[in-house]
Amino acid sequence: MPRQKTFQRDDVVDRAIDVFMAKGYEGSTVNDLVGATGLHPGSLYNAFGSKQGLYEAALERFDAMSPFNQLLGLADTAPPRESIKRILESVINPDPDGGGVAGCLITFAAAEVGETKP
């Protein structure tokens, strides 16, 4: 009989986001991720398949939870002028907790991939 998961996937991914934000994908080791998430290596691999699988889950969650992206989603219903003002304000004064442009895991991912040589 398979064991039941005893962790919340979003909590694990959120902790992994912190590691990837601090060290980047290449700089993050499985031991770093195990330490941050509290999972055993086997549980991490069973849940995500690989370090890359966890990274992809982190990118997807960050994208979905990003205050900047939530702001963009509000632009569909808010008045255009207010939407533009709020988006520009978030670029000028980004949220230090990951909102706006500064501290963006997606931006860091693009920069890190751009640094690798073919």
Image (cartoon, rainbow, N blue to C red):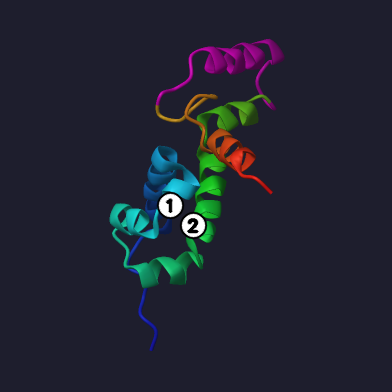
Element marked by disc 2: helix
Q: Check residue 54 in the rendering and tell me which mark sits there, or answer none.
A: 2
Residue 61 location (% of width, % of height): 52, 46
Element marked by disc 1: helix
Residue 78 location (% of width, % of height): 65, 20
Drawn side of residue 63 relative to residue 46, left or right = right
**What's the residue type where badge 2 is placed?**
Leu
The magenta segment is 76-96
Residue 113 location (% of width, % of height): 61, 43
Comparing labels 1 and 2, the label whose residue is closer to the camera: 2
**Gap between marks 1 and 2, in whole Å?**
7 Å
Front-most of residues 14 and 107: 107
Q: Check residue 13 in the rendering and tell me which mark sits there, or answer none.
A: 1
Q: Residue at x 56, y 40 (%)?
A: 112
Drawn side of residue 105 relative to residue 18, left or right = right
**What's the residue type where badge 1 is placed?**
Val
Q: Is residue 70 magenta?
A: no
